[in-house]
Image (cartoon, rainbow, N blue to C red):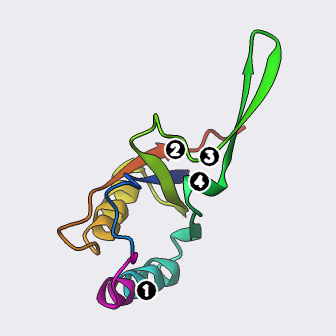
């Protein structure tokens, strides 16, 4: 079965400072339990803020390292999941359900891409 990487993109400037509400965490936990029991979830995690990250760039034969925050960036990857699904449509359905665990005041975008094998 193919594997898919889902990158959860958020706008750190507009995300709630207090993070997910307890109710949202409960909904998310229940969905993660369901997807794990279904044998679909392989790995998932949230990421620390971009202010704690670094970008390493190779350009023109030179390496540069830029420490966060990255003020020119509107959206950053705030989390990810790796799932094993029968096809992209199934991976997208699980992703839609995950996004629906968020309250209406969140703006979250998820990019689902198949992992190239071999």
Residue contact between numbered discs 4 and 3, judged by CB atoms under 8 Å: yes
Tell me: residue 108, above or below residue 111.
below
Which residues are drawn in magenta? 18-27
Measured from the top left, where is residue 14 in percent x and y? 31, 57
User: 10 Å neighbourhood of mark 4: few (<14), some, or many (≥20)?
Assistant: few
Of the numbered discs in the image, which one, if any, rests on residue 64?
Answer: none
Distance between mark 3 and mark 2 Cα atoms: 28 Å
Q: Quadrant of residue 59?
A: top right
Circle nearer the viewer, 2 or 1: 1
Circle nearer the viewer, 3 or 2: 3
Give the mark, 2 or 4, whose residue is nearer the N terminus. Answer: 4
Give the mark, 1 or 3, whose residue is nearer the N terminus. Answer: 1
Residue 6 appears anywhere in the view: no
Position of residue 63 in the picture relative to residue 85 (left or right) = right
Give the mark, 2 or 1, whose residue is nearer the N terminus. Answer: 1
Q: Which residue is mark 2?
A: 114
Tell me: residue 106, above or below residue 54.
below
Tell me: residue 6, above or below residue 59.
below
Query: Is residue 106 on the magenta stretch?
Result: no
Residue at point 53%, 75% (across, down): 39
Residue at point 45%, 80% (across, down): 32
Specify the quadrant that holds the N terminus: bottom right
Q: Which residue is mark 1?
A: 29
Q: Main secondary structure of the magenta part?
A: helix
Furthest toward the left, the residue is 104
Q: Which residue is mark 4?
A: 51
Residue 61 appears anywhere in the view: yes
Measured from the top left, where is residue 96 in percent x and y? 29, 62
């Amino acid at each position: 079965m193919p594997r898919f990487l889902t990158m959860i993109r958020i706008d750190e400037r507009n995300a709630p400072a207090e993070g997910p509400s307890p109710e949202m965490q409960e909904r998310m936990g229940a969905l993660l339990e369901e997807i794990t029991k279904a044998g679909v979830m392989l790995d998932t995690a949230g990421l620390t803020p971009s202010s704690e990250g670094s970008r390493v760039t190779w350009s023109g034969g030179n390496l540069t390292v830029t420490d966060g925050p990255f003020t020119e960036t509107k959206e950053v990857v705030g989390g990810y999941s790796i799932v094993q699904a029968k096809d992209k449509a199934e991976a997208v359905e699980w992703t839609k359900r995950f996004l629906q665990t968020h309250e209406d005041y969140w703006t979250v975008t998820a990019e689902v891409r198949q992992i190239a094998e071999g």
